[in-house]
Image (cartoon, rainbow, N blue to C red):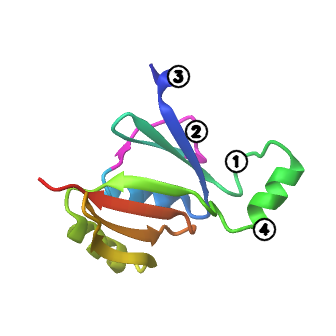
Amino acid sequence: MAARQLKVGLRVRDLDRSFDLYRQIGFRHLPQPQQANLRYLTFGHTWLILSHVDKHGYHNAERESQTRSGPPGLGFVLVVPAADLDATYALWRREGLPVTLEPEDVGWARIFYGLDPDGYEVMFEEFPA
């Protein structure tokens, strides 16, 4: 079954901090003890795989250099549903993480955007009941 899952991989600088943050916003841990430099999480049917930027291999030296020199995930947005947008926003602020778009009602949902500890943009959306 796992081979048919959508998987998103993010390279992160502090594996434990990112892992804890994503668990706090609703991701569930899938233990993989044989993978010390990776953390597997799920949200619904989607997997999120966090890998340590310094301890997980690259396809080639050029890709490694580009990844290390540029801002991580520029143009990439991870969209996460939130059961309570205000609580998620409060968590983001408590963690000292940047908010790039304050909470607003866009008609179909309430949303806000923020940057995770590695600069990946995350959009949270809370749908009307």
Q: Mark 1 is on which residue type?
A: His
Of the residues under marks 2 and 3, which one precedes in the sequence? 3
Residue, disc 4: 69
Badge 4 local density, few (<14 within 10 Å), some, or many (20+)? few
Q: Is residue 14 left or right of residue 45?
A: right
Q: Which mark is residue 35?
A: 2
Residue 129 image point, x, y percent: 11, 53
Direction from residue 8 to residue 74 in the image, left or right: right
| Mark-to-mark CA distance, 4 and 3 | 31 Å
Asked if residue 67 is positioned above or below residue 47 in the image, the reply reads below
Q: Calculate the distance from the C-alpha at mark 2 to the C-alpha at mark 1.
A: 10 Å
Q: Which residue: 65% across, 63% down?
A: 72
Q: Amino acid at mark 3?
A: Ala
User: What is the CA distance from the residue labelled 2 to the residue labelled 3?
Assistant: 17 Å
Residue 30: in magenta span: yes
Judged from the image, the secondary structure of the residue bearing numbered disc 4 is helix
Q: CA distance from mark 3 to mark 1?
A: 21 Å
Would you name the residue on which mark 3 appears?
A: 3
Of callouts 4 and 2, the N-terminal one:
2
The residue singled out by tag 1 in the image is: 56
Badge 1: how crowded within 10 Å, few (<14), some, or many (20+)? Answer: few
Q: Is residue 55 visible?
A: yes
Question: Looking at the image, is 68 positioned above or below residue 52?
Answer: below
